[in-house]
Amino acid sequence: MKRIRIFDTTLRDGEQSPGCSMNLTEKIEMARQLEKLGVDVIEAGFAIASPMDHKSVQAIAGAVSECVVASLARCTKGDIDAAWDAVKEANHPRIHVFLATSDIHMQYKLQMTREQVLQRISDMVAYAKGFCDDIEFSAEDASRSDWAFLAQCYTNAVAAGATTLNVPDTVGYSTPQEMSDLIHYLRRNVPGIENTDISVHCHDDLGMAVANSLACIQAGATQVECTVNGIGERAGNASLEEIVMALRTRRDFYDADTGINTRQIYRSSKLLSNITGVPIPPSKAVVGANAFAHESGIHQHGVIANAQTYEIMNSADVGIPQNTMVLGKHSGKHALREKLISMGYELTDEELEAVFARFKVLADKKKNITAADIEALVLHRRHNIHTTCQLVSHVVNAGHGVPNLSCIKLRRDDQEMEDVAIGSGPLDASFKAINRMLGLEQQIRLESYSLNAVTDGEDAIGEAVVKLATAGGKSYTGTGLSTDIIESSIRAYVNGINKMLEEAN
Ligand code: KIV
Ligand code: ZN
């Protein structure tokens, strides 16, 4: 059976998509989860892009030990120097250099001739090789490049020391048959390609990224580039969970597998959604809320008789928590720890304390606490630790035909502060009071707001997500959790502000 390497680019291509930016702490948390998931390569960022990108690639290089850590670099010495500087402390560093090879990119973007591009590839792959053994070369827009010229580009990259050749369908234009033919063509026409990994990187503009990636695997690709939840530029990248589960579920067809611990898939997906505030669409394959739900009577009947009538995967194999065992207000820390372990979460004592404190608060308000509730508490535990501002109390007076008024008390460092504001609704009033208290009225704007119920029922926890935009054009996502939706919204707002303040410090 073929072993396919999973190159995860959630923290680079994924993070480039609108609304998906993450701060340093979040990137490190996500990278650690990717390592638990068992990806082979983490593309940690584009080190030259900004000092913050450089810092995060460097921090991830120090935070993971098993995975290869890659930084992207254009074919210039400055980019390659920055990439190497950021990944050099990793146990397994990789420099990923790229240059566009399609006529349209060379003419309009690079303003370079084919000869110049060929020379640049040779020079810059060799330059990167001077730092690091593990060099990946990507021909950007490969799928729209002239095939003979493309083969020459890869030939130069191999001759200069590239160990992985990546074939991107940068604009998501190709079909599975075309991608498959291209991989076969390159295997026949690039001398030395048999000693390298052949990688594919497909975008989802026509909804074919996963199908294209799988077709390339059949044609001989040994590495796929993908992201958790399929996030990425424009319509996104190929989704990691879909590729992995397709290979696993249809092993009979693909005769290939990955090193992914599939039981960590759901957790990785939820963590990313929680960090970015980008919800998982309900009908998203593998991880969507409806992926294992059966609504029609005929289907329900079939599944009760034999799950395989309508389920081709087992939800437990993807790590979706079973909601059977519940905890309540008499459950102790030990029971909570056991439940967490059964769900695959191993927390430190400090983290368990924080989750347990929130569990007790929730248990006072909600009779039966399910796995979904507990998961939400774990994902939100970060908010209790290292925060600059904390919500102490809120009183809201809202209704129709009366002024909507909110009184908020916050603690910033060791100081308590309080303010009252009137707004068009209870949340507007609360957010105004917070902005005034912190002197942020001119600096931030509420960009978007959403509220989701974590579980069913009238005592469900509400998870609020706010996106705050700063005057400087930056955006911060805050999330908050409570059975009281006004409280979860205020917490989400304060959480977003904390992220902004943390970055400013
Ligand atoms: O889509 C693309 O071509 C890329 C490359 C930089 C690999 O992201
Ligand atoms: Zn891409």
Image: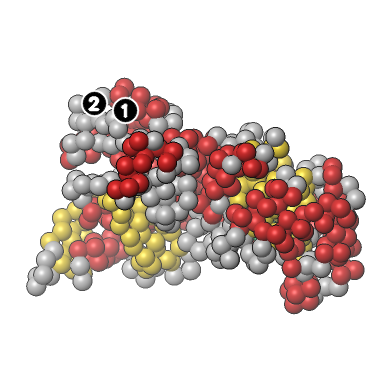
User: Which secondary structure lies at badge 2?
Assistant: loop
Compared across the picture, whether 381 is left or right of 97 comes to left
Tell me if label 2 and label 1 are in contact, CB under 8 Å.
yes
Q: Residue at x 76, y 65 (%)?
A: 100
Q: Residue at x 88, y 60 (%)?
A: 152
Single out the residue that lies furthest toward the top: 334
Tell me which numbered mark, 2 or 1, is placed earlier along the sequence. Answer: 2
Q: Is residue 42 above or below residue 501?
A: above
CA separation in Å, label 2 and label 1: 7 Å
Q: Quickly name the residue at label 1.
A: 336
Q: Residue at x 53, y 56 (%)?
A: 231
Q: Quadrant of residue 371?
A: top left
Residue 502 visible (yes or no)? no
Within-10-Å neighbours for mark 2: few <14, some 14–19, many 20+: few
User: Which secondary structure lies at badge 1?
Assistant: helix
485 or 179: nearer the viewer: 179
Q: Quickly name the residue at label 2.
A: 331
134 or 416: nearer the viewer: 134
Q: How many marks?
A: 2
Q: Amino acid at mark 2?
A: Ser
Q: Position of residue 37 (x, y in %)?
A: 55, 37
Q: Amino acid at mark 1?
A: Leu
Q: Residue at x 32, y 42 (%)?
A: 301
Single out the residue that lies furthest toward the left: 401
345 or 174: nearer the viewer: 174
Compared across the picture, whether 276 is left or right of 215 comes to left
